[in-house]
C-alpha cells in the first residue's frame, strides 16, 4: 500500500505540482508564456514601432522627428529612382548569393554525406562549420585583403592575364557567399544523409543514368532543404550592410541607406527598414509552399 499525505500536510508547492501534473495544457501554457511574451514585447513590438515611425516626418531645418501621420516616406520610396534601384539591387544581390551558395553547397554536401568515409563525415561537417566560430569582421577584412589591389586574388589570376575583382558589387557577392555558405551546406547535408540508399539503387536497377537519378530522385527530396537554407542566405544577405561597406566600394544596398539615414532622417530609415521585412515575409510565404519551413 502507498502512503498518502493528509490534505493538511500537503504544502502549496506539492498542491501546485499536482495541479500541473494533471493539467498538461496548463503546464504547457506556463512554459510558453515567458518566451512568447518576450517575443511579442521585444521583437514584434520593435517591428510595430518601426512601422509606425515610418509614417512620421522630419523637420527639414532641425532634422527633429515630427510625429505627424504622413505617407511621404513610402511615396518617396516608390517614386525616387535611387531608392528603387537600391532596393532592386539589394534583392538581386540576395538572390545571387543564394544561388551561388546552393551551387557550391550541393556537391560539397553530397561528398560529406554520401561519398566520404563514415568516420570522416563528422570531421568534415565540423570543418565546414568552423568559419562560423570566427569573428564576422575578421572574415570580412580577410576578404578585403584578398580582393585588394595586389592581393591574393590578383596574384592567383595574374598568370592568366586577369585581374582580381577589386572592391565593388562582385566583391560583395563573393564575400557574402563565403559568409553564409555553411547555412546552406548543413540542411542539404542532413537531407542527403537521410536519403535512403535503396532509392538510388532502385533507380540504377531500372536503368536510370546518374543525371536522371539526380533530377527524378535526389533533387525532389532535397529541394525543401535547399529552400530552407535559402531562407538564411537570402535574409542575411538582404539585411547586411557591413560587408558592402568594407568590400563593396561605392556600391549601396538598402542596409547602407538605412544606416546613413538614422541620424539625418529617422522616419525615412524606418520606411527603408520595412522594405526588407516585407520582402522576407513574402519570401517566407513562397518558401512555405515548398515545405522549406518544416525542414528548418
Image: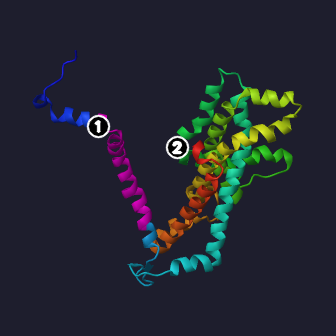
Q: What range of the chain is rendered magenta?
A: 21-49
Q: In which quarter of the image is the N terminus?
A: top left
Residue at the image point whose x is 70% and y is 44% from the top: 223
Residue at the image point whose x is 71% and y is 56% from the top: 170
- Nearest the viewer among 44 and 55 is 44
The answer to which quarter of the image holds residue 52 is bottom left
- Nearest the viewer among 246 and 271 is 271
Mark 2 or 1, closer to the camera: 1
Residue extending furthest toward the top: 1
Residue extending furthest toward the left: 8
Q: Position of residue 78 (x, y in %)?
A: 61, 77
141 to the left or right of 65: right
Report the number of numbered marks. Answer: 2
Q: Position of residue 290 (x, y in %)?
A: 66, 50
Residue at the image point whose x is 37% and y is 48% from the top: 35
Task: Give the residue at mark 1.
Answer: 20
Question: Would residue 292 be seen by someone viewing this image from the given angle?
Answer: yes
Task: Give the residue at mark 2.
Answer: 135
Amino acid at each position: 500500500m502507498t502512503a498518502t499525505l493528509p490534505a493538511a500536510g500537503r504544502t502549496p508547492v506539492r498542491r501546485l505540482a499536482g495541479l500541473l501534473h494533471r493539467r498538461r495544457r496548463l503546464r504547457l501554457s506556463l512554459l510558453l508564456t515567458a518566451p512568447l511574451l518576450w517575443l511579442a514585447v521585444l521583437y514584434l513590438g520593435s517591428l510595430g514601432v518601426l512601422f509606425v515611425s515610418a509614417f512620421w516626418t522630419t523637420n527639414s531645418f532641425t532634422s527633429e522627428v515630427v510625429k505627424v501621420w504622413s505617407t511621404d516616406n513610402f511615396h518617396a520610396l516608390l517614386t525616387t529612382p535611387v531608392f528603387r534601384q537600391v532596393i532592386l539591387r539589394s534583392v538581386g544581390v540576395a538572390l545571387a548569393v543564394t544561388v551561388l551558395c546552393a551551387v557550391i553547397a550541393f556537391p560539397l554536401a553530397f561528398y560529406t554525406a554520401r561519398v566520404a568515409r563514415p568516420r570522416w563525415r563528422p570531421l568534415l561537417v565540423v570543418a565546414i562549420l568552423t568559419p562560423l566560430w570566427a569573428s564576422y569582421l575578421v572574415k570580412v577584412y580577410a576578404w578585403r585583403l584578398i580582393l585588394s589591389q595586389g592581393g591574393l586574388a590578383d596574384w592567383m589570376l595574374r598568370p592568366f592575364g586577369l585581374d582580381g575583382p577589386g572592391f565593388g558589387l562582385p566583391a560583395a557577392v563573393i564575400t557574402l557567399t563565403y559568409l553564409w555558405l555553411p547555412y546552406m551546406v548543413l540542411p542539404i547535408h542532413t537531407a542527403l544523409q537521410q536519403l535512403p540508399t535503396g532509392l538510388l539503387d532502385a533507380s540504377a536497377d531500372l536503368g536510370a543514368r546518374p543525371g536522371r537519378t539526380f533530377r527524378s530522385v535526389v533533387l525532389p527530396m532535397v529541394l525543401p532543404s535547399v529552400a530552407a537554407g535559402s531562407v538564411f542566405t537570402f535574409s542575411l544577405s538582404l539585411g547586411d550592410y557591413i560587408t558592402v561597406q568594407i568590400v563593396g566600394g561605392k556600391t549601396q544596398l538598402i542596409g547602407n541607406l538605412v544606416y546613413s539615414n538614422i541620424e539625418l532622417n529617422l522616419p525615412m530609415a524606418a520606411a527603408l527598414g520595412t522594405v526588407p521585412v516585407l520582402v522576407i515575409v513574402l519570401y517566407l510565404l513562397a518558401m512555405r509552399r515548398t515545405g522549406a519551413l518544416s525542414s528548418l
